Image (tube, rainbow, N blue to C red):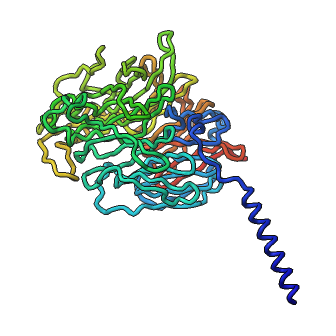
Amino acid sequence: MGNGILLLLGLALALSARVAGLTAQQPPPPLVSAQEILDGLTADGSRWLTFGGNYSNQRHSPLTQITPANVNRLVPQWTFQTGTLGNFETTSLFRDNVLYVTGPQNVAWAIDARTGRQIWRYRRELQPNLTACCGLVNRGFGVLGDKLFMVTLDAHLLALDMKTGAIVWDVTMQDYKNGYASTIAPIVVKNKVIVGVAGGEFGIRGFIDAYDAQTGKRVWRFYTIPGPGEPGHETWADDSWKIGGAGVWVTGAYDPEQNLVFYGTGNPGPDYHSESREGDNLYSTSLVALEADTGKLRWHYQFTPHDVHDWDSTEVPVLADITIGGQLRKVVMFANRNGFYYTIDRTNGKVIAAKPFTTTTWAKEIGRDGRPIELPGHTPDEKGSVTCPDITGGTNFWPPTFDPTTRTFFVNAREACMTFYAWKPDYKAGDRFTGGAGQRGQGSEQPYGALRAIDPATGDRKWEFRYLTPSTAGLLTTASGLIFSGDAEGNLLALDSRSGKLLWRYQMGAPMHGTSPTTFMLDGRQYLLVPAGTTLTAWALPQ
């Protein structure tokens, strides 16, 4: 019997050694490389690793399996119920058949892309007195190596382990008790995680930060409101710069050739009361181009100097190289909340084309010096003044898209006006600091929305598809000639991107708010992933 026990022990040890050897031979979990992120959306559809699909934020997929001819045959493959209330404004990341998804209230998931099964779930314990405006939302992960990066509503930046969802590091960006929050989807450039803060309605001083992806150590900070002795400080009267807002809460773009990041900045504060902050109020409502390694300002362009209508310029910048006047130009395209569309030279910040894409009563055009030529009678006061567009703007933070094949920029636009009021506010740290309000329902017709196709060389409209009411959905185009959108009534829409013809619609039960579909390939099939309400739904053609 003793020999039998020894024999069993020997076999067990041998088996254990063999298993250990096999384990040692297995490759480690694949890491997301900086080169993969740089490559963007590839023809095989195997990944979606940044907020905009690529650093240019074009949200244009090279996939062609789903076409205008067969899009009406799409059927749901699975649904994932988040069980979390709040607006679902995320862009999901995809790699190695796993989806990485953030939701409202800083809940996040890893999901099996084949089945919709939850792999892991993370939830942050949040304080009850958060000041995040407007909604306890999150717009997505950044990724590098084996880490996911997510900002929080209490103004922290987290690194999570991709495999488990466990926290690797946690850094404080700013004290949330003073009105700071963060909802932005980070972008990762080289080894830096680049983020910004929200809080323009709470008297913050906005900034853009870069953090070391491995350690969480802050590498640089760019204040969107210049301090004493810095260029632009003179555009703020007295001490108004200290509480001037200019948050950054929508993801920027990156140009690897110039090594520049581009971010739109928020409104100055208080939002409406002009006399509280006389001057242009740089760098609020602007596009800033920063050196990615240092955060140094290369150039800026201010869309709305001395904004008094809460027209954040935190719309998504889109980069492309397009031929204008027979010359290839490196541009950044920007549909602004103030009602104007802009094509800007991204090497120097000079305006190439600027034209209203919605009704704008506050300015008639953009002058040769790049400044708007304003019309009188649009400074809010206690009596109120009617201005178009309204507070939500000609568009807002929901992503546009750009089709490089047809050289067309697409945006969900809004037609709405508002009576703006202003009064002198008192500042108290952490409280709302707006100095006014707005009342909708003013103007010549009922508010409506439209998906508009714009020629970036001129700013001219190619076509439009009207909605009954304004849509807050983001957009996705594909190389097969499709554009996906959504309306305010909860319909997912597919249109021909060359003509604007409606091809298919499906009632999702809730609208897409501030987010857009993404698409990827899995097991030889093209999937369309749609966040709406509290649900994530995956679509594909029948097998």
| Residue 202: percent from left, percent from top | 24, 48
Tell me which residue sits at (59%, 45%) in the image. Answer: 32
**Left or right: 253 in relation to 313:** right
**Left or right: 22 in relation to 328:** right
| Residue 338: percent from left, percent from top | 31, 30
Q: Residue furthest top?
A: 326
Pick the front one: 54 or 229: 229
Tell me which residue sits at (20%, 52%) in the image. Answer: 429
- Is residue 12 placed above or below 501 in the rendered structure? below
Pick the front one: 532 or 352: 352
Would you say residue 446 is visible in this rendering?
Answer: no
| Residue 441: percent from left, percent from top | 26, 39
The image quarter in which residue 104 lies: bottom left
The image quarter in which residue 197 lies: top left
Would you say residue 71 is visible in this rendering?
Answer: yes
Tell me which residue sits at (80%, 70%) in the image. Answer: 15
Pick the front one: 125 or 395: 125
| Number of marks in picture | 0
For the N terminus, which image quadrant?
A: bottom right
Pick the front one: 136 or 100: 100
| Residue 455: percent from left, percent from top | 47, 21
- Is residue 473 placed above or below 409 in the rendered structure? below
**Left or right: 370 in relation to 329:** left
**Left or right: 288 in relation to 90:** left
- Is residue 362 placed above or below 472 in the rendered structure? above
